[in-house]
């Protein structure tokens, strides 16, 4: 199955680079397959340093910000091994990519769990959070998909946002819609 969250890698200056990631995992969260595009900053940073931290989040706003290339409004705590833990995460897993498959544009990195931590209970995802996540994914595919089809999907997804969103989901929804309108 795929779990959505934020992956923090280390830039050469030691600061965090955060990107949305949907790794393929098993239910025990022991088997990890990271699939960054070889053209991405995340891939380049993982090749230079195979350690990273995956964050399980219940806030969709930083995921939307990262996916669309906006500054991610998070604070971090330094991990003892050198990575960065997003303070807003529910829990995190430090991963190390053990081997790579590089025969396609979208690489595959098999990773093992090195350490993990719990910060707070997972609040959960309501329909609005799911709708924002789906809309964010659509926005990242504007160059691949028919614009009219995306606008139809947004109209359908907006119902869940209208009915179930809180302030963070509404802010993320506006961000996604503004992004789509400008592109």
Image: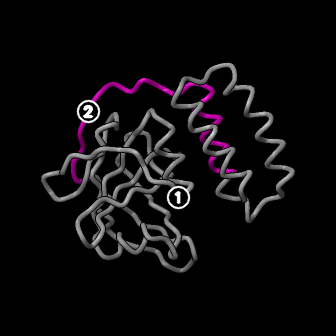
Question: Is 128 placed above or below 6 here?
Answer: above
Labels 2 and 1 touching (C-beta < 8 A): no
- Residue 17 locus on image (x, y percent): 36, 61
- Residue 149 locus on image (x, y percent): 84, 49
| Disc 1: CA contacts within 10 A as few (<14), some (14-19) or many (>=20) | few
In front here: 74 or 93? Answer: 74
- Residue 27 locus on image (x, y percent): 43, 39
Q: Tell me if 9 is positioned left or right of 63 in this view.
A: left
Q: Foreground mark, 2 or 1? A: 1
Q: Tell me if 121 is positioned left or right of 182 in this view.
A: left
Check disc 2 and report the residue beneath it: 119
Q: Which residues are magenta?
A: 114-138
The structure residue drawn at horizontal position 40% and vertical position 45%, both measured from the top left corner, is 73
Question: Is 84 placed above or below 47 here?
Answer: above
Q: Secondary structure at mark 2?
A: loop
Spatial CA span between label 2 and label 1? 26 Å
Is residue 23 visible in the rendered image? The answer is no
Q: Is residue 24 magenta?
A: no
The structure residue drawn at horizontal position 51% and vertical position 31%, both measured from the top left corner, is 168
Q: Is residue 115 magenta?
A: yes
Q: Which mark is residue 69?
A: 1
Is residue 25 visible in the rendered image? The answer is yes
């Amino acid at each position: 199955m795929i779990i959505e969250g934020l992956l923090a890698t280390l830039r050469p200056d030691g600061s965090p680079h955060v990107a949305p990631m949907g790794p393929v995992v098993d239910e025990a969260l022991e088997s990890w397959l990271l699939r960054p595009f070889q053209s991405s900053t995340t891939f380049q940073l993982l090749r230079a340093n195979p350690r990273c931290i995956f964050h399980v989040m219940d806030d969709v706003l930083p995921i939307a910000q990262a996916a669309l290339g906006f500054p991610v409004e998070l604070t971090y705590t330094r991990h003892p091994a050198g990575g960065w833990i997003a303070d807003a995460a529910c829990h995190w897993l430090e991963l190390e990519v053990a081997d790579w498959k590089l025969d396609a544009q979208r690489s595959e990195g098999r990773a093992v769990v090195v350490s993990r931590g719990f910060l707070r209970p997972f609040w959960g995802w309501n329909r609005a959070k799911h709708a924002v996540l789906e809309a964010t994914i659509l926005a990242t595919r504007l160059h691949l998909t028919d614009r009219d089809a995306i606008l139809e999907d947004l109209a359908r997804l907006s119902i869940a946002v209208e009915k179930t969103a809180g302030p963070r989901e509404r802010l993320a929804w506006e961000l996604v819609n503004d992004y789509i309108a400008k592109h």
